[in-house]
Image (tube, rainbow, N blue to C red):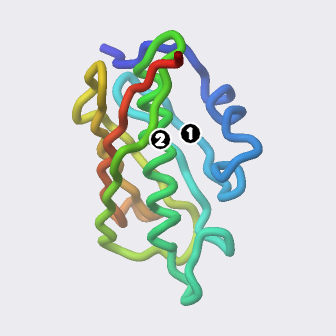
Amino acid sequence: MAIWKRETTLLQLNQRSVGCMVEHLGIRFTAFNDDSLEAVMPVDHRTTQPFGLLHGGASAVLAETLGSMAGYLCTEGDDYIVGLEINANHIRSAREGDVRGVCRPLHTGRSHQVWQIEIFDQQDRLCCISRLTTSVMQRK
């Protein structure tokens, strides 16, 4: 059973990312399943640190992008999502290609949500595991 309350397409998700950090880092949403959202991000001059490895901050941006968008898709009406806390454990480095983030819910409540995001390299090896806590806000 799908967890999403909003209808969307991958094209619409990617169009929402134009003109912000998500587009600047080359993040693209690639899969939208009943209970997960996926995106890829290139490991290139925009996302590496001075030693040529994927920057931990770029991994956090990918994780927060996935969790925030997934959180938004679990809301209705004028509700929106803000991040409260993110952590990231960097397990393996990546030097090239794309990394793939997979976001799944741990909790989707009325006032807050908790998301787990796993980031894999091109060989499908776990590079980072992140947890994002979001708050569901209502426009006034």
* 133 over 76 or under it: above or below: below
Q: Secondary structure at mark 1?
A: strand
Within the image, what quadrant is residue 41 found in? bottom right
Furthest residue in direction bottom, as rendered:
51
Q: CA distance from mark 1 to mark 2?
A: 6 Å
Does dot 2 land on a helix, a strand or a loop? strand
> Given the current orientation, which residue lies at the most extreme right position?
19
Choose top left, top right, bottom left or bottom right for residue 108.
top left
Q: Are marks 1 and 2 in contact (CB under 8 Å)?
A: yes
Alpha-carbon neighbours of circle 1 within 10 Å: few (<14), some, or many (≥20)? some
Mark earlier in primary sequence (1, 2): 1
Q: Residue at x 47, y 23 (%)?
A: 73
Q: Nearer the viewer, residue 88 or 33?
A: 88
Q: Which residue is mark 2?
A: 38
Q: Provide residue 129's location: percent of width, then percent of height.
A: 30, 58
Residue in the picture at 59% in, 68% down: 43
Towards the viewer: 85 or 38: 85
Image x and y of residue 93, in percent: 41, 76
For label 1, the residue is 30
Quarter of the image with the N terminus in it: top left
The residue sitting at 65% across, 71% down in the picture is 44
Amino acid type at image mark 2: Glu
Residue 118: x %, y % from top left: 34, 52
Q: Which quadrant of the figure has residue 109? A: top left
Please state which amino acid type lies under the numbered disc 1. Answer: Thr
